Structure formats: C-alpha cells, structure tokens
Amino acid sequence: IQETDDLYYGPIIYDYEINGVVHGDFGDVPYNETRPTLPTWQAGPVVPIYAPFNYDYLSVTNPQSLYSALESRNMVITEAYGLPDESNPQEVEEAAIWFDWYSNYIPPTDDPSEPMSDVYYPIFETRENVKVDLENGDDQVVGLLAATWFWRDVLKDILPDDSTGIVVVFDNPCNPSFTYMVNGRIPLYLGRGDQHETQYDDLVIQNDFSGLSSPEFSSIPLNENYCPFQISVYPSSEREDVYTTADPI
C-alpha cells in the first residue's frame, strides 16, 4: 500500500523484525497486574526501524502523557519536542539524530527540526451512546489512538495571502516556548523562545485550547491540566509597515 501512496516519503521495507510478545527497549515486558501495557497494534505508515507491533509505549522513559490520557479518559496533547537547547551540546547532538531520521518520512521541502507534539485520543471498550459520560459512566479505556504532527501544520493555510507579519508564540509549562511568523498561508519558524517584538506587547491576543473541550467539537474533551498550551498572537514591524504610509488620505 505504501508503494502506491504518493504522500508516503519513507523507505519501502519488505523484510523487518517481528516480535510476537509485548516488549520494550530492554526486552520483553512480563505481565504485571498492577501495571498496564500499551502495545502498538496498528500503525500508519508502518515505520519498521524495529518490530512495528507489540512495542509497549508505557516502557518509554517519560510516559506521563500516556498515563494522563488513560487515567483522565480525556484527549491529551503532549508537550512539544524538537526544541534542543543550543548551548547544550548533548541535547543538540541527540536532536540531530532524530531530525535526520524524521527527514526520511516527510517531504524534502519540509524542515524536520521544527517542534512537534503527539495527540492521544482514548478508545473505549463499549459505547452505548455517542457521547461518553466521563463523570458518571464506567466506560473503560482499552487503548489510545495516537498521531504526531508538526506545529507548523496548525498554522498552514488559515490566513489570506495578504495577512503577513503575524507573530505566534506557543507557551506551556512543560517545554520551552517557540515562535512562528505567519505570512499568509505559510508559517515561518523563528526558533525556540518568545521572539515577538516587545514594542507590541500591548497588542497581544491570547487564547488556549480550552475550546477543544466543547461538546460541539468532540465527545472526548481535552485534558486541560496536562501541559496546557497558550497561544499569543502579536503584530510585527513587518506588519506595521504594510499599514504605514506617507500618502495623504
């Protein structure tokens, strides 16, 4: 299927390792009544750098976001990653390894070194109603639907072409802030940190993702306690120049 998918940019691998038992980075994961496992059963695209199925994601070093989705039975947007501290050689080296790997699976014109996040959406064992009653119901979470995206994709194709010089800063308590400038339909990554021009502080517009908890959006609300993102939008000197003129009215 991936051979015929024009949107798949990764290598086509016919022979890859298979592991029929639940496993992690350090071998098989034995059954434990006090600890759940979260093995991968389906993936798209299949990226078999290791056995693509039965890998236990709760065996990773930092599974707090996964536990947050399982325990709250809410959708979780994870902290952003791909934000190495340029003054820390080890962080930069480790990030470069991941960026090199990401580059194999995205279009050659896309930058693999921009920030990204995962989203985890609970899957319930039974569904008697379209809406899950998280407060009074006993619906049991039996898995998670997971997806990964670059934050640039959130900003693509949302403004008309003449809306240039819009600065967007993403903040949350779990990772460094990062900044984009949106020029029409195209977001430009400015880098780690809050890089807006401070002379426009009083013109900021701020919001968060709490609207994703609206029942009109989804039957599963967003967990607003796990690494909540705040979005700050500012004008820029580039934007001001568009509207500044010496011509008489």
Image (spheres, rainbow, N blue to C red):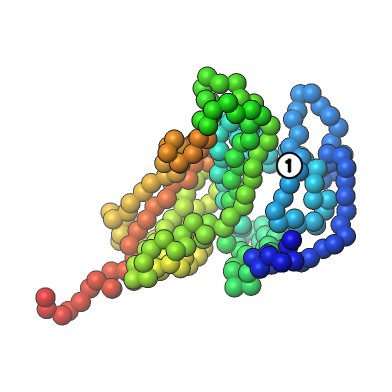
The residue shown at (60%, 21%) is: 138
Q: Say if 135 sits above or below 227 in the image.
A: above
Label 1, residues with CA under 10 Å away: few <14, some 14-19, many ≥20: some
The residue shown at (88%, 53%) is: 17
Please identify the quadrant where the N terminus is shown. Answer: bottom right
Relative depth, front residue between 209 and 135: 135
Query: Is residue 193 among the parts visible in the rendering?
Result: no
| Quarter occupied by residue 103 | bottom right
- Residue picked out by circle 1: 57
Q: Amino acid at mark 1?
A: Tyr
Relative depth, front residue between 175 and 164: 164
| Quarter occupied by residue 183 | bottom left
Residue 90 x, y percent position in the rendering: 70, 58
Residue 4 x, y percent position in the rendering: 71, 66
The residue shown at (80%, 43%) is: 54
Relative depth, front residue between 164 and 142: 142
Residue 248 x, y percent position in the rendering: 11, 78
| Quarter occupied by residue 49 | bottom right
Residue 7 x, y percent position in the rendering: 64, 65
